[in-house]
């Protein structure tokens, strides 16, 4: 049974990879050069640094773009783990960044409305979500199935059992009959069932015992954060590393030089 539950957990954690139509890839040049060291993440994180803020960068360890305070919620699309540490890439709008930033270098914001920045993962803590729940309660999940008919129900979905309300149906209609698995029984004896994909939402839960109740959210499981700073902080100095474009340029130059030397040797012989 443990083996089956572990297998289910792995499928849930990787389910986003199966939905190719929603997978977005960054246009970042750093990402393009380090794609092999980047993994799909797609989770929300709170900024939570002991200093009260974190810095957004144009690339890991590159040029600082802005300082943003603790408590800012970021959606990390991909995670890079390599020689420059552990970083996440975030898509931001210029207007939102201007509203939330403590300090901002306007010269680093492109003309496009949306652009990509990198943030050190050590300054983040994940928002409690379905993946967090599955990891925490793996030993209490029942490897069983339940069938739930939504026909005629004003059903509700939750992010995880007793978690935030995800969706509330306001009109009765003929809907699908769902097969839910695994099953979780909360402290009140209510049964909950999981479905990997439902009308555009991934990994949602239904309370099988009370599917129309929108008031089943329990105590918050969100982590406690370090206090946020409220005053503007100076941006750190940019690292004077080698620009990412230099590496492929040098490689191309070496290839051309090698080819020319080879041609010259052939002519001599």
Image (spheres, helix red, strand yellow):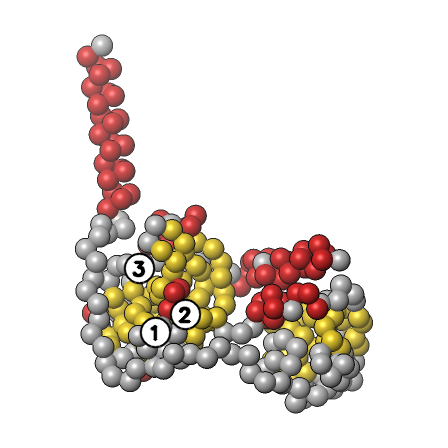
| Among the two numbered marks 1 and 3 on one chain, the one whose residue lies closer to the N terminus | 1
Q: Which residue is mark 2?
A: 124
Q: What quarter of the picture does the C terminus occupy?
A: top left
- Residue 134 in the image: x percent, y percent? 62, 67
Residue 50 position, x and y percent, is 34, 74
Instruction: Name the residue carrying label 3.
Output: 59
Residue 112 or residue 80, whichever sits in front = 80
Q: Nearer the viewer, mark 1 or mark 2?
A: 1
The x, y position of residue 223, in whole percent, is 49, 77
Residue 225, compared with residue 146, is above or below; it is below
Q: CA distance from mark 1 to mark 2?
A: 10 Å
Circle 1 is placed at which residue position?
A: 50
Where is the N terminus found, in terms of image quarters? bottom right
Residue at (42% x, 50% y) in the render: 37
174 relative to 166 in the view: left or right = right
Q: For mark 3, give the secondary structure.
A: loop
Q: What kind of element bears circle 2?
A: strand
Mark 3 or mark 2, which is nearer to you?
2
The circle on residue 132 is none
Q: Earlier in the sequence, mark 3 or mark 2?
A: 3
Q: Nearer the viewer, residue 139 or 68?
A: 139
Q: How many residues crowd around disc 3 within 10 Å: few (fewer than 14), some, or many (20 or more)?
A: many
């Amino acid at each position: 049974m443990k083996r089956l539950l572990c297998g289910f957990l792995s499928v849930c954690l990787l389910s986003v990879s199966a939905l190719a139509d929603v997978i977005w890839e960054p246009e970042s040049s750093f990402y393009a050069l380090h794609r092999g060291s980047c993994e799909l993440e797609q989770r929300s994180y709170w900024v939570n640094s002991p200093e009260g803020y974190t810095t957004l960068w144009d690339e890991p360890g590159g040029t600082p773009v802005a300082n943003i305070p603790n408590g800012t919620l970021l959606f990390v699309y991909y995670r890079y783990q390599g020689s420059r540490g552990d970083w996440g890439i975030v898509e931001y709008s210029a207007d939102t960044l201007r509203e939330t930033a403590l300090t901002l270098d306007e010269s680093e914001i492109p003309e496009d409305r949306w652009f990509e920045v990198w943030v050190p993962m050590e300054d983040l803590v994940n928002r409690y979500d379905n993946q967090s729940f599955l990891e925490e309660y793996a030993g209490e999940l029942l490897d069983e199935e339940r069938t739930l008919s939504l026909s005629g129900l004003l059903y509700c979905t939750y992010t995880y059992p007793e978690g935030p309300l995800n969706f509330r149906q306001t009109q009765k209609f003929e809907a699908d009959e769902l097969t839910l698995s695994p099953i979780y029984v909360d402290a009140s004896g209510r049964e909950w069932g999981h479905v990997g994909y439902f009308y555009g939402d991934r990994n949602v839960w239904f309370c099988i015992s009370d599917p129309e109740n929108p008031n089943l959210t329990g105590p918050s499981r969100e982590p406690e954060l370090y206090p946020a700073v409220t005053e503007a902080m100076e941006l750190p100095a940019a690292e004077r590393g080698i620009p990412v474009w230099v590496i492929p340029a040098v490689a191309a130059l070496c290839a051309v030089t090698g080819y020319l030397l080879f041609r010259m040797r052939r002519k001599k012989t």
